[in-house]
Amino acid sequence: MIILPFIASVFMIVAIILLLKLTPEQVTDDMMKFVSPKQSLRDKVRIAQGKKKTRRLSNALKSINTALAVTGKDGQFATICTVSLALLFCGGIFAILIDNIFLVPIFAASLALLPFAYSKKTIGYYNQHIEQELETALSVITTSYNRSEDIVTAIRENIEFLKPPINQIFREFMGDVTINPDIKAALYKLKDKIDNSIFREWVDTLIQCQTDRNLKDTLEPVIKKLSDVRIVNNELKTKLMEPRKEYFMMVAMVVGNIPLLYLLNQSWYHTLMNTVPGKFVLAICGVVILITTLFLNKFTKPIEYRR
């Protein structure tokens, strides 16, 4: 029986964590030190000059951490890293228990990526919600601004009609203006509240309008970009639905052939599961599924506007 040794191994990992009194924060700090070691001053200068690139894995983890912080879930990053590390060990142990050493890195990597994939999916839904509310908010604020030529008045007139979390962001802007009447400084602070290129372009244009009021007519074309991106993403979502469905059907057929082979021909099943060539074939299938899944997510994600 594989289940009982696997459960025993999981309890052993939990016991080690409790014995060493490891916390999610400690695990995350150690993981980040391993993934992104401390850089020397020379390395930082070379990265700034474009002569050296930072590690992709380090950049990916930092982007997830930043996105979670922006969405108010920065405390979850430590939990995600801890769960990912635990799943990494569970995947490796499961591969060892089914006596296929070739599948150890594949199962470990696949399970370790699951928490980060879930977090990125959640962040994607949040960003989509932000963009929808942002389009409405910027539209009504710009309409009022074109009439009054005063951004504080424009936001005050519409802030009660804005929905969270956009409502809170503009309330913070109003609070900054109340404390410090320097509108440009408050706008620069507002610019960093939302990680969206179109929003930042709108704020940049608004900052220029504080010097030249004639530039207010350029605000509407900037907002129209949000509508264009939303329309294109809706069209792409419909077109890409079929290829994604076909891909997952193919993966299900490949994986489903293993138990089917057990029912149809146990000799072939024994060759696939218990011989070195068969185990190697399973490992190749696992690598192909893992890599193609990563490429699928990369090429079918919603498009973003970049200046």
Image (cartoon, grey):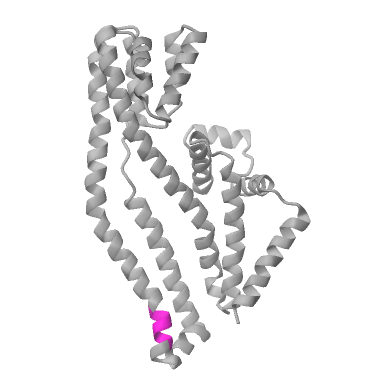
- Image position of 137 with respect to 113: above or below: above
- In the image, 44 versus 223, the foreground residue is 223
User: What residue is rendered at 46% in x and 13% in y?
Assistant: 185
Q: Main secondary structure of the magenta part?
A: helix
Q: Is residue 306 visible?
A: no
Q: Which residues are the magenta region?
A: 257-262
Q: Is residue 119 shown to the viewer in this render?
A: yes
Residue 180: x, y in percent?
A: 50, 8
Q: Residue at x 46, y 84 (%)?
A: 272
Is residue 118 inside the magenta stretch? no
Residue at the (37%, 56%) spot, across then down: 295
Q: Nearer the viewer, residue 255 or 212?
A: 255
Residue 46 x/y as whole percent:
53, 35
User: Relative to 133, is 91 above or below?
Assistant: below
Left/right of residue 206 with respect to residue 147 in the rendered view: right
Which residue is outermost to the right? 19
Q: Dividing the image into 4 quarters, which one contains the N terminus?
A: bottom right
Residue 176 located left or right of residue 250: right
Direction from residue 240 to residue 63 in the image, left or right = right
* Left/right of residue 16 with respect to residue 208 in the rendered view: right
What residue do we see at 32% from left, 52% from top?
Answer: 299
Q: Is residue 153 above or below residue 75?
A: above
